[in-house]
Image (tube, helix red, strand yellow):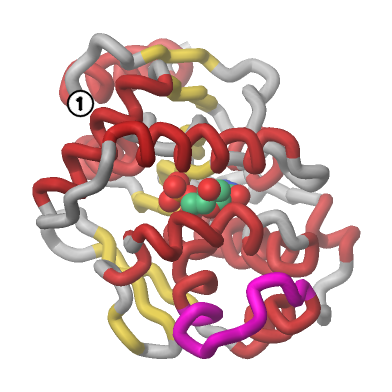
Amino acid sequence: MRNSLEAYRKFSPQQDRGPIITIDGPAAAGKSTAARLLAQRLGYLYLDTGAMYRALTWKALRDKVDMKDKRALSQLAEETQITLSCQADGKLKVYVDGEDVTTSIRSAEVDRFVSFVSSIKEIRERMVLQQRKMGMRGKVVAEGRDMGTVVFPEAEVKIFLEASLKERARRRWEERREKGVFLEREEVETELANRDRMDSQRKISPLKKAEGAIVIDNTHLSISQTVERILQVVREKLNR
Ligand code: DC
């Protein structure tokens, strides 16, 4: 690991940067769509950090790396170039070493292994540095699990987005069904619950509400209502 742990821990915000908005929360709470639409509305950069962990997991599976071998996975992270590129329509394209993996990183197999891959210290250190670099100038909506707690603790606006497990499972099931993937509802619910448990119980940067974060439960909100609610918080915080 070339980057020191100290650099990983320390975030030195630029004095003249634009605002940073962080959105953290459990899997399938609608963070990605809300963050993308919000970024579009504000003309900000959209940073989907889950996509980065997914991209690395995808490559590890493709290369048949032993998914229990932390050292091999960390080594793979060192050798892998992950790029996020915002399209004109606001959607994000994800590349691994130049290859477009936008669709493949959403597979059930990646879902199954990504929590483990993202719990590895060396991998997180590397990702966090890249994420800070991307968000350095501000005017960014950063979405993930540790955006408000670790990556951008100085963010002006911190949101913790959640919804009931049942509703999140329903949304994920529906999303997959639209793509022609038919799963059992219970299977989706169990997978989400497992991932939430691993993401919130891991030692490094566990999923938790950041200090000062505003909690929005969108179990009964549509995606546009969720975005409006977040925008309301953003306006209140930034106009203060
Ligand atoms: O948001 P998502 O489902 O695409 O994220 C995939 C996984 O990546 C998730 O289970 C936990 C991990 N993750 C993380 O540990 N830290 C982040 N900032 C974002 C995602």
Residue at 42% x, 22% y is 165
Q: Is residue 169 above or below residue 221?
A: below
Front in this rendered view, residue 166 or 118: 166
Residue type at the position of mark 1 = Ile
Report whether the residue tagged 1 is closer than 8 Å to ligand 1.
no
Magenta highlight on residue 63 = yes
Residue at 78% x, 68% y is 122
- Whether residue 42 is visible here, answered yes or no, is no
Q: Alpha-carbon neighbours of circle 1 within 10 Å: few (<14), some, or many (≥20)?
A: some
Residue 15 locus on image (x, y percent): 64, 45
Front in this rendered view, residue 46 or 199: 199
Residue 111 locus on image (x, y percent): 44, 55
Hey, which quadrant is residue 196 in on the image? top right
Magenta range is: 59-70
- Whether residue 222 is visible here, answered yes or no, is yes
Residue 166 locus on image (x, y percent): 35, 20
Q: Is residue 55 left or right of residue 30?
A: right
Hey, which quadrant is residue 229 in on the image? top left
Residue at 44% x, 21% y is 162
Q: Is residue 33 left or right of residue 29?
A: left
Front in this rendered view, residue 47 or 20: 47
Q: Quadrant of the N terminus?
A: bottom right
Q: Which residue is mark 1?
A: 223
Residue 151 locus on image (x, y percent): 66, 47
Q: Is residue 170 above or below residue 56?
A: above
Residue at 18% x, 19% y is 222
SS under mark 1: helix
Q: Is residue 172 above or below residue 127?
A: above
Magenta highlight on residue 87 = no
